[in-house]
Image (cartoon, helix red, strand yellow):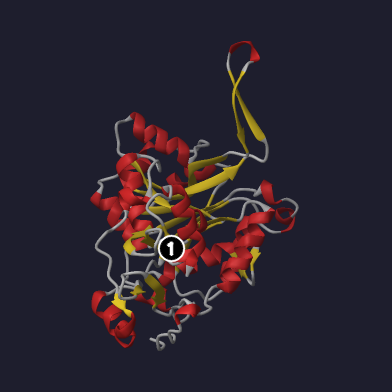
Amino acid sequence: MDKYIGYPSMPLLEAMQQIDAGARGILYVVDDEGHLLGSLTDGDIRRFILRTGGLTGTVEAVMNRSVRFIYEGEIQRAEQVMQELHIRSLPVVDTDGCAVSILFEEDEPGEKLARTAEKSDIPVIIMAGGKGTRLYPYTKILPKPLIPIGDVPIIERIMNRFHQNGFDEFYITINYRKEMIKAYFVEQELPYNIHLIEEELPLGTAGSIRLIREQFDTPVFVTNCDILIDVDLHHLVSFHRQTHNDITVVASMQNTQIPYGVLHTREHGLITSMEEKPKLSYLINTGMYLVEPELFHLIPERRMFHMTDLVEEAMRQGRRAGIYPIGESAYLDMGQFEEMKKMEERVNNEGESQIIVSNKESGLSPMPEI
């Protein structure tokens, strides 16, 4: 139970890392005696980041104090309560209001995706024309989009995730080893529509979009071909529209620890302070965007141009560019060998049922399967 428990004084950055590690999207907040005070979700933190522009703060300032719970004697009602309230977890407290257990609705394989598979007419552009130099020598043999993660090429995994969420129209821009990519898709029978857009010259991560002749009348997803993003795509679309963004960049919180003691100095080389192995935190660009189609006219024809150039040009013209923040574990980048291994481990574990978590010391029986 401990990994789902937070404290009011906990820094938000630490809380976000703990939420990521727990993979349930929530922490329950207790005081030093264990009394249940509230809850904190990844959505609460996302709204805080958007409101303040950073993660400076504590759990107490952001947590939801109107938390739902049941008493130990009501354990048999847990399933009914979660269904009525449309929640996926429920803390159990004793007569003193102390948290003794947390119950989670158990997911069957594919259940979460099936619940959100409402159809969408929003197209997806996948930028798959690069050489994948970070993955050499793999890419000397295979183009990066066809490098398998498990037994499925990364680009097919990307499309499958979109398709499972109701997105069926894909435009794939190709260049490097494009004949192999074309041959692969000719041999596949996939349940969605694929349009291959061929570059004659390398045009960067945005330049080839101008080769698409389709006139879009909805926002358009644009994504790199070497990333997996675990995000509610429909919520992202709603967020993009509600904020009236012209372009929304999916941004992941990433934490880097400097493995050395850092010296802070002033003039004449005098040390002002020392910091042992500091941890730095940044919101980084994942390579997934949601773009209003009129922005594509800002992309020059037949010239190297990247999505970052498009964001900067949009801002120069006074257009609205915003972020949609996600946690560190919600983003996987295949572009480096170590990350490839992490990605493969993650996708191999997909589809396994998540168990109900309870405090064994409480003596409570697990909730029946839902």
Residue 182 vs residue 361: left or right?
right
Extreme residue in the top direction = 268
Answer above or below: position of 121 versus 136.
below
Q: On the rendered structure, is 223 left or right of 89?
A: right
Which residue occupies 43% across, 80% down?
Answer: 106
Q: Position of residue 168 (x, y in %)?
A: 40, 67
In this orientation, does residue 74 appear? yes
* Horizontal and vertical percent position of residue 217: 28, 54
**Three-letter amino acid code at the position of disc 1:** Ile
Indicate the quadrant containing the C terminus: top left, top right, bottom left or bottom right. bottom left
Is 31 in front, or is 162?
A: 31
* SS of the residue under disc 1: strand
Horizontal arrangement in the rendering, residue 181 relative to residue 28 (left or right): right
Tally the marks. Answer: 1
Q: Position of residue 222 (x, y in %)?
A: 43, 52
Q: In the image, is residue 238 above or below residue 312?
A: below
Q: Is residue 79 visible?
A: no
Q: Residues within 10 Å of mark 1 (few under 14, many from 20)?
A: many
Residue displayed at 40% across by 54% down = 221
* Image point (69%, 59%), residue name: 142
Report whether 267 appears left or right of 64: right
Q: Which residue is mark 1?
A: 5
